[in-house]
Amino acid sequence: MNHPLKTFVFRDLPAPLSTLAGAGLVIMSSSRLSFGLTAAAALLWVYDLTMTAVYFAQPIYPKIGKNIALILLTSFLGSCFLLLLWLYSPLLALETGYIILLTSCYCVGSPAFARFDQPAGKPDTAEFKKIILKTSLEAGSLGILIIGFALIREPLGFTTLSLPGGPQGIIELFPPFDEDSFLPIGVISGSSGALLLLGYGAALFRNIKK
């Protein structure tokens, strides 16, 4: 169920929502901008460090059972990111812990690792730069999509924008409105609102592709 669909944005990069893990990440992490920024940073962290480890550890990287090794590696790197976030803001780490660990699931199902063949011979710096750029673009495309959804959902749902940090885990850039007239639009901040935006986004993507 987590296999990527044959839908590509440009060249051979897969669409960010081509896996169930990607759709789940967008729904859960785009409710607030602070969560979206954290998820985007976690994606780049897990993707780039995983590819770096896989590329340069080719002499000891197992060829049999490599998917198991990939799961353990991405889970470890996601846990490291969560630990660093805990040192920076414990409350934010509690709020986004599941989101950060879900980035490992998205990374495991990525075509970048499924199609990656370990090169023969010594690692080549130029080739590594091309590979790491490709993985960064794949992770960054989903991160940008999450941030874009958050910029729509949080102002409409909470009438404010937030950044990571502060004693409450997030810093609100301006105070939210408390008027009852703004409460009905708050549905956009829930999972149902995210599904609505996903539907509109998928329809827009199909139209642009045609």
Image (cartoon, rainbow, N blue to C red):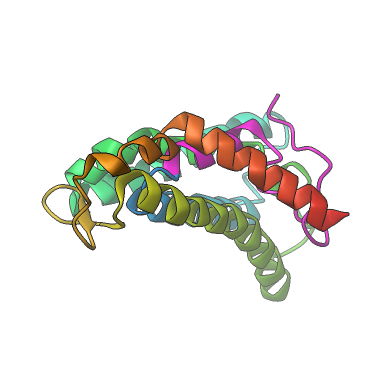
- Kindly give the residue lying farthest to the front in the view shown: 181
Query: Image point 42% across, 38% down: which residue?
Result: 99
In the image, residue 163 lies at what x, y percent? 28, 59
Indicate the quadrant where residue 166 lies: bottom left
Query: Image point 61% across, 57% down: which residue?
Result: 141
Q: Which portion, as a residue range, is magenta? A: 1-29
Which quarter of the rendered picture does the C terminus lie within?
bottom right
In the image, residue 70 lies at what x, y percent? 59, 37
Does the segment drawn in magenta span residue 135?
no
* 39 over 122 or under it: above or below: above
Tally of numbered tags: 0
In the image, residue 90 lies at what x, y percent? 18, 44
Q: Main secondary structure of the magenta part?
A: loop
- Kindly give the residue lying farthest to the bottom in the view shown: 126
For this view, does 9 lie left or right of residue 35?
right
- Kindly give the residue lying farthest to the top in the view shown: 1
For this view, does 106 lie left or right of residue 97?
right
Query: Image point 43% across, 49% down: which residue?
Result: 39
| Viewer-nearest residue: 111 or 20 | 20
| Viewer-nearest residue: 186 or 90 | 186
* 114 over 165 or under it: above or below: above
Q: Is residue 81 visible?
A: yes
In the image, residue 44 lies at what x, y percent? 51, 57
Does the segment drawn in magenta span residue 7?
yes
Which quarter of the rendered picture does the N terminus lie within?
top right
Query: Image point 22% across, 50% down: which residue?
Result: 177
Q: Is residue 117 visible?
A: no
